[in-house]
Amino acid sequence: QVKLVESGGGSVQPGGSLRLSCAASGFALDDDDIGWFRQTPGNWREGVSCISGRDGLPYYADSVKGRFTISRDNAKNMVYLQMISLKLADTGVYYCATAVCTSQSGVYYPTSDWGQGTQVTVSS
């Protein structure tokens, strides 16, 4: 069964950091683009970052560029999202999914079902 499970969310103050993990099971994600998405209160789910399966190139939404770093460890079947300088606007539920990355800010097309996500809360 193809499954992606998110973890690592939590509550932090503005300026804080978190590292999200996306664990794949039931398939090897080596060749897959993997995207991180988030749903913030009152908004549609949006693309945050994406990493290419072909060449490992990262893509970022303008709103997180310079603050978030996506990476992958194919040997561990994992993808990560390191988040620093977190802002109140980053609060939301974060999801990972297999995806199709594009170079357009935040435009990533999910191709797998959504999991439970992991809650990120930034508050003072």
Image (spheres, grey):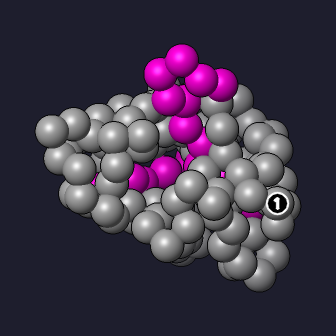
Q: x%, y% of residue 112?
A: 74, 37
Q: Could you tell whether 63 is left or right of 9 in the image?
A: right
The residue lying at 29 percent from left, 35 percent from top is 121
- Which is nearer the eye, 124 or 114? 124
Of all residues, the one furthest to the top in this rendering is 42
The answer to whether residue 72 is above or below residue 118 is: below
Q: Could you tell whether 44 is left or right of 18 in the image?
A: right
The answer to whether residue 124 is above or below residue 53 is: above
- Alpha-carbon neighbours of circle 1 within 10 Å: few (<14), some, or many (≥20)? few
Q: x%, y% of residue 30?
A: 70, 68
Asked if residue 60 shows in the view, the reply is yes
- Secondary structure at badge 1 equals loop
- Which is nearer the eye, 89 or 5? 89
Image quadrant where residue 103 sits: bottom right
Magenta highlight on residue 90: no
The residue lying at 55 percent from left, 37 percent from top is 38
Asked if residue 78 shows in the view, the reply is no
The answer to whether residue 124 is above or below residue 113 is: below
